[in-house]
Amino acid sequence: MGSNNYSVPLEQGAPFVLRPADPIVGASFSILVPNHVRWELLYVQFQLITAPAGGARMVIFQLDDATGTFLIWEQNATQAASMGLSYHFVPGDGNAAATIGQRRYGVFPRNLILLPNTTIHFAIDAINPSDVVSNVFIHARRWAERNV
């Protein structure tokens, strides 16, 4: 059992995988944590295929709540036009990132529990209207309010 800022007892649930619909061409994506649950973010992955036109793109991972953005993480490298990369965000220490083959890795804080109505948002700086984001997977664990 965990706790949160509101001292409401929480019950740990099983891990789950959320597979939202791919965004339309030329768009990034956002996921909203529903009411009355908290999500422990375990792993996020998606693929970005850039169009031939336009300059380099940079992926930006951010978490927003009702008061604004409270965590933002920018890739330390850009993605060129006409390229496909698979992005993998994992819990860890620091903000180190690495590109291995066609995979680019990023790190977010360990034990990151998101409160209800937090938005997980991925933006692509300088996105082209023909860029394609696909294969979005959010791996998380539910923490639900427990009645006492």
Image (tube, rainbow, N blue to C red):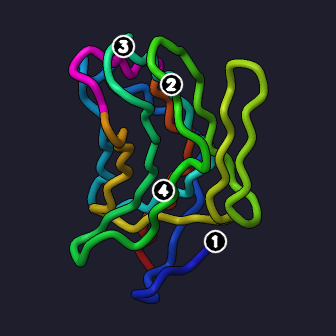
Identified by mark 1, the residue type is: Met
- In percent of width and height, residue 88 lies at 63, 35
Q: Is residue 144 left or right of residue 106?
A: left
According to the picture, the residue beneath numbered tag 3 turns out to be 51
Of residue 85 and residue 77, the one placed in the foreground of this image is 77
According to the picture, the residue beneath numbered tag 4 turns out to be 39
Of residue 139 and residue 95, the one placed in the foreground of this image is 95
Q: Is residue 14 left or right of residue 124?
A: right
- In percent of width and height, residue 110 lies at 69, 64
* Dot 3: element: loop
Of residue 65 and residue 54, the one placed in the foreground of this image is 54
Report, in whole angstroms, how far the alpha carbon at label 2 lies from the one at label 3. Answer: 9 Å
- Chain-order first, disc 2 or disc 3: 3
- In percent of width and height, residue 28 lies at 30, 34
At x 33%, y 69%, the residue is: 69
Residue 138 forms part of the magenta stretch:
no
Identified by mark 2, the residue type is: Ala
Tell me the mark number nearer the camera, choosing from 1 and 3: 3
According to the picture, the residue beneath numbered tag 1 turns out to be 1
According to the picture, the residue beneath numbered tag 2 turns out to be 80
Residues at discs 2 and 1 in contact (Cβ within 8 Å): no
At x 49%, y 80%, the residue is: 4
- Chain-order first, disc 3 or disc 4: 4
Tell me the mark number nearer the camera, choosing from 1 and 4: 4
- Chain-order first, disc 2 or disc 4: 4
Identified by mark 3, the residue type is: Ala
